[in-house]
Amino acid sequence: MNVLLVGSGGREHALAWKLAQSPRLSALWTTPGNPGTGQVSNNVSIAVDDVSGLVGFAQSHAIDLAVIGPEAALEVGLADALSAAGIAVFGPTQAAARIETSKTFAKQFMQRHGIPTARFAVFDQPELAIEYLDCLDYPVVIKASGLAAGKGVIIPGNIEEAKIAVKNMLVGRAFGKAGEQIVIEERLQGEEISQLAFCDGYTLALMPAAQDHKRLLDDDRGPNTGGMGAYAPAPLCPPVLQAEILERIMQPAIDGLREEGMPFIGVLYAGVILTEQGIQVLEFNARFGDPETQAIIPLLKTDLLEIILACTRGELKHITLDWQDGSAVCVVMTSVNYPVKSALPTPIHGLDGLPPNCLAFHAGTSFSHGKILASGGRVLGVTGLAASLAKAADAAYEGVKQIYFEGSHYRKDIAHAALNRGCSKYKSAGVDIDAGNRAVEMISQSVKSTYNQRVLAGIGAFGGLFDAAGLLEMSAPVLVASTDGVGTKVMLAAGEQRYRGLGIDIVNHCINDILVQGAKPLFFLDYFAAPQLKPEILAEIVAGMAEACRSTGCVLLGGETAEMPGVYLPDEFDIAGTIVGVVEHSRILPRGNISAGDRLIGLRSSGFHTNGYSLLRKLFEGDDLKQPLGESSETLSDALLTPHRSYLDLIMPLLNSIESPVKGLIHITGGGFVENIPRILPINCGAIIQLGSWEIPPVFRLAQMRGQITDAEMYRVFNMGIGMMIVASERDVPKVQAAIPESTWVIGEIVEDNQHQVRLV
Ligand code: AMP
Ligand code: GLY
């Protein structure tokens, strides 16, 4: 048989993958398809709503059977046109598809046939709709009647929001077309399941019930989407409940459509909500669901082509569907900014080498110069298959972990609600998706976002592998390494629940420590210790580390998470890290030529960086850190917790210049001016710092006043607004200052002094 499959999403890839396994298939064409369908069928670039183009193609290629994926094709009457051309079609007529394409039709149809659904009314006049809202004593949802790609439903928080939604929809035409209607219906409470069935107009064959995850973010937060993941079978919907759905919803719908003169051939999909009062239909769809299909179809053992053919011939009752015993979980990976904005195409890595019980279905992908690109929206559906729901979820996330593309997003909790509900044996057997695995899952995308071609092994390996062949291009590479910790700033940040900045702190601190020896970073490894692992906190911290690493081209090559109850008090934790960088031997800093008369040029700090927090915590103990600091909206908490800045981008161009004027660099860290400046002074030199030669940020003054602290002490503990100093000859000062794209100050000079002192004058 020659088969035409219409569509280009993950659903169509799953269908093409299954159809391609049929012994009855001669040729499979997918229009327009995607790189995934291209692996199992022939893609032809015809749009799903180009009815005459598709009919023409079907005729010229002797298509025996057409399978229609998306509702957009049904709405424009593709099934009708193909049938009229004598081609067998799996997918309902334009009239029958109204059960999905017109919510007004669907609600009135359900009412006519006694199918349980929420109370409702239909409006096309905003005044009448608003009057109606004023009379109701229950919460509502407001729906645009026509297709709106999942964006046509508003769940208002109160009556005012409901009225605004009505006006937007009917007056502003926010979602619908001109002349559009809206449905106002009672808002129901309960779990939602997706029940799909094959139909031949008379008979139904139910698929395993599935559950979709419509919201963008974990724990069902964030905006509605086309669907972020699905699993099947749904433990919430055991066979008895499926039987009730068949009897009270699916069969009456199929019979009703036939009796009204529009027999339904295709997949009928009921979105059912399980309320305390029983099952109710939220919506019907006239097609396979997406991503549900990506979880359901891999469980099907029977030949899909056989089933579909039987549907088009009214012979479904002669077929028995055979399903695998286990479960399937599909996790959708989207592009950055989905569902709000589209993203630029970016290469996908790791599609080869997925675990054997894992399938990757393509949706928003494209093919260019031999590479598969993520080209926006829902990019991939990664389906795991296993004997239990828990293992299937593990398999799917194993697959997701292998795949990387820039800006990828996925939910970390697909199927978790079902697992936690106790519907499966998973939790009771004590095998929770334990915090450790969850943490690795949560941080792996951040870590991978820092990788470059030099990373040969990273997360999950015993040791990270970093290809050093690139260093061969240098004439005499010297590796520079440093380890440091964030210190007690972690406690202040924990109190404020601001974790991300701590990750930035440790990376930038380490970057600056090796920068002062002239090195640029290659890779970083972190260490996180806590009495009890809280994956969400670790994920935030690591996201901060990854952000800082990315912005300086440093790889986050590995790390260690230590759970140490009894060593740290509850809610305490510690963060440390190690960095390795490289410098040409001839460019190691400080140079040997620092001498009396050289100037110290100060670069502004972003705040306290990572030093002086034991004192700061005492000074501000009991203060409301949310109070504004001055005129601006900056709070004390903001000022105290601003992340440590990196000076790499500011200074590296100067270090790379042919005759670098930089004789030395001083990172003002623990020990302030007094202890850090001498670290680079020649044996017979000291330094003078001119107080008042730069602006000290107000928060340092505030700390000083608060503790009645002497200047000497302040300069021994804090950076006083100067995070980095450059040592240069007096003659080179203008050159240095011109090369740094922000305000800098000459704050002091090197003087002869056998005592090696730093004097504040
Ligand atoms: P629909 O496009 O009708 O599936 O609506 C999208 C989502 O809106 C559904 O998955 C539900 O989460 C929600 N929704 C729709 N109708 C109702 C309702 N009557 N009560 C509560 N939630 C609803
Ligand atoms: N997953 C929801 C839909 O296909 O409409």
Image (cartoon, helix red, strand yellow):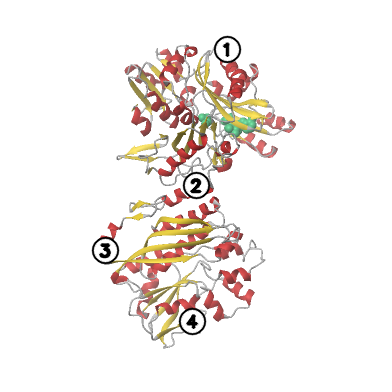
Front of the two marks 2 and 4: 2
Identify the mark nearer the N-term, 1 or 3: 1
1 and 2 marks in contact (CB < 8 Å):
no
Mark 1 or 2, closer to the camera? 2
* Whole-number angstrom distance, CA of label 2 to CA of label 4: 54 Å
From the image, which quarter does the N terminus lie in? Answer: top left
Is 389 positioned to the left or the right of 551 in the image? right
Q: Earlier in the sequence, mark 2 or mark 3?
A: 2
Q: Disc 1 marks which residue?
A: 260
Residue 264 rendering spot, x and y as whole percentages = 52, 16
- The residue that label 2 is drawn on is 437
Asked whether, in this view, residue 746 is left or right of residue 279, the answer is: left
User: Can you give x and y, in whole percent of width and height, for residue 484 in the image?
Assistant: 46, 66
Decide: marks 2, 4 in contact (CB < 8 A)?
Answer: no
Residue on which disc 4 sits:
690
Indicate which disc, 1 or 2, sits on the residue closer to the N terminus. Answer: 1
Q: Amino acid at mark 3?
A: Met
Query: Cβ of disc 3 within 8 Å of ligand 2?
Result: no
Name the foreground residue: 402 vs 658.
402
Mark on residue 474?
A: 3
Q: Earlier in the sequence, mark 1 or mark 4?
A: 1
Q: Label 3 to label 4, Cα distance in Å?
A: 40 Å
Instruction: Judge whether residue 390 can be spotted in this image.
Output: yes
Name the kind of residue labelled 1 in the image: Glu
Circle number at residue 618: none
Judged left or right of residue 472, residue 329 is right
Q: Amino acid at mark 4?
A: Gln
Q: Residue at the location (28% across, 60% down)?
A: 471
In the rendered structure, which amino acid carries the disc numbered 2?
A: Asn
- Mark 1 or 3: in front is 3
Mark 3 and mark 4 lie on one chain; the one further toward the N terminus is 3
Quarter of the view holding residue 683: bottom left
